[in-house]
Image (cartoon, rainbow, N blue to C red):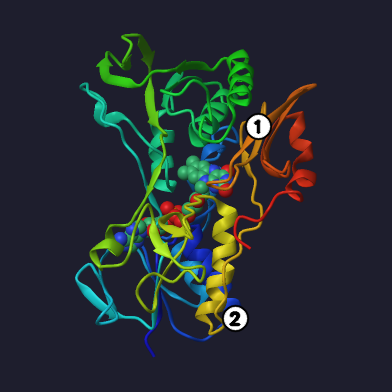
Amino acid sequence: MDPLIIVGTGLGGYSLAREWRKIDANTPLLILTRDDGHYYSKPMLSGAYTGNKPPDAIALGDAAAMASQLKAEIRTRITVEELDTAAGCVRADGVLTAYSNVVLAVGADPIHVPVAGDAAELVMSVNDLADYANFRAAIATARHVTIIGAGLIGCEFANDLLSGGIASAVVDPAAYPLSRLLPAEAGAALAHAYAGFGVDWRFGRTVARVDREGTRLRVTLDGGEVLATDAVLSAIGLRPRTALAQAAGLDVSRGILVSRQLRTSSDRVYALGDCAEVDGLVLPYVAPIMQAARALASTLAGKPTDVAYPPMPVLVKTSRYPVVVAPPRPGVSGSWCIDRLEGGMRALYRAGDDRIEGFALLGSATAERQKLSRELPALLD
Ligand SMILES: Cc1cc2nc3c(=O)[nH]c(=O)nc-3n(C[C@H](O)[C@H](O)[C@H](O)COP(=O)(O)OP(=O)(O)OC[C@H]3O[C@@H](n4cnc5c(N)ncnc54)[C@H](O)[C@@H]3O)c2cc1C
């Protein structure tokens, strides 16, 4: 019997394998990955510096351990370069392998904005364990890091570096941090709190150049300001990896388009995780991946199951002033109602009929997370 093939050993690929093995212990499982197949929790990467966790302390199991745990064959350092849906096989490093079903769990690429300067190639991003190893090595003796992007990952790294004794400047064209998730007042409160802890915010700016200056780097912003720094981390977002699917003729939009059963536009081909777009939603977070893995495992085991997305607030790991955010569903109109509390802020997004459609909780208000989550509508029923 042809195996189920899973492409990718991130949280998407491994979670699916684990859920599927709970239901189907015997069908052959082949997992192909272009990395080393280590299992790790990616969210730890933006909080690991504080805990002085080197990369091998983050890895929870290597490919051999995962293969035995999952009763799978895992081929590492191999790139799937073609998906032939008519023949029902994948080509990886020149070798064709037939599948019974195939699941794309190929993740997303960091977005890079073009930067000029003789050290532009030193701008890093951290989207996997190998990136994290490079980043740690690059900041081993750093006193200051410049972060491009004040989104979730940029803010978390600023927090982590701060706790580890490294100062940071955070550069973002928006007027406040987490600008795609928070109302302006909440963003301003977060910025104010972290400015007090020492973060040097540079809002309304982008990085124009990165040049070498002796043993350090010189970052020039588009307004002409110059920052002396030791490393530059780009954290401006992710773009789902759709190229493999697109070349195979599958429907793609922002992500690989899948139905509620995680099925692509081609039979026997599925997708989940950061690469997938489910019912118009690209949600590059852990909770939706776990929901998808459970639903897809059932579907692959012969019980077609729609994925459900209950309310899934995201905790932003800005530990000195934590943020929990549940953005409103796309297309739902309403307005933010903001209450300043002792040590925090509660921002509720209320739809026209006054129902709570989303929230942003800061500082002390994060204690209300569970109570308010129960009032939110599901993203997908
Ligand atoms: C620094 C950081 C912090 C985060 N913090 C949080 C958090 O606090 N909470 C939260 O909910 N989410 C967080 N996230 C997001 C969350 O970690 C991701 O949504 C999740 O890990 C994505 O898993 P994935 O399996 O879809 O993709 P990935 O983990 O990127 O895995 C993709 C896999 O596909 C493989 N691959 C790709 N192309 C090919 C190919 N052609 N052939 C073979 N293999 C291929 C790769 O090698 C890799 O194994 C964070 C993300 C980052 C980067």
User: Could you say whether the residue bearing mark 1 is in a helix, strand or loop?
Assistant: strand
Q: Circle 1: is it few (<14), some (14-19), or many (20+) Cα within 10 Å?
A: many
The percent position of residue 77, horizontal first and vertical second, equals 31, 61
The percent position of residue 103, horizontal first and vertical second, equals 41, 70
User: Could you say whether the residue bearing mark 2 is in a helix, strand or loop?
Assistant: helix
Residue type for callout 1:
Trp
Give whichever of 67, 240 is nearer the camera: 240
Q: Which mark is residue 204?
A: none
Residue at position x 76%, y 51% in the image: 374
Q: Which residue is mark 1?
A: 336
The percent position of residue 36, horizontal first and vertical second, equals 38, 58
* Number of marks drawn: 2
Residue at position x 74%, y 35% in the image: 366
Q: Circle 2: is it few (<14), some (14-19), or many (20+) Cα within 10 Å?
A: few
Q: Give whichever of discs 1 and 2 has the lower sequence position.
A: 2
The CA distance from mark 1 to mark 2 is 44 Å
Q: Residue furthest top?
A: 225
Q: Which residue is mark 2?
A: 23
Disc 1 versus disc 2: nearer the observer: 1
Q: Is residue 347 above or below residue 29?
A: above
Residue 20 visible in the current orientation: no
Give whichever of 378, 23 is nearer the camera: 378
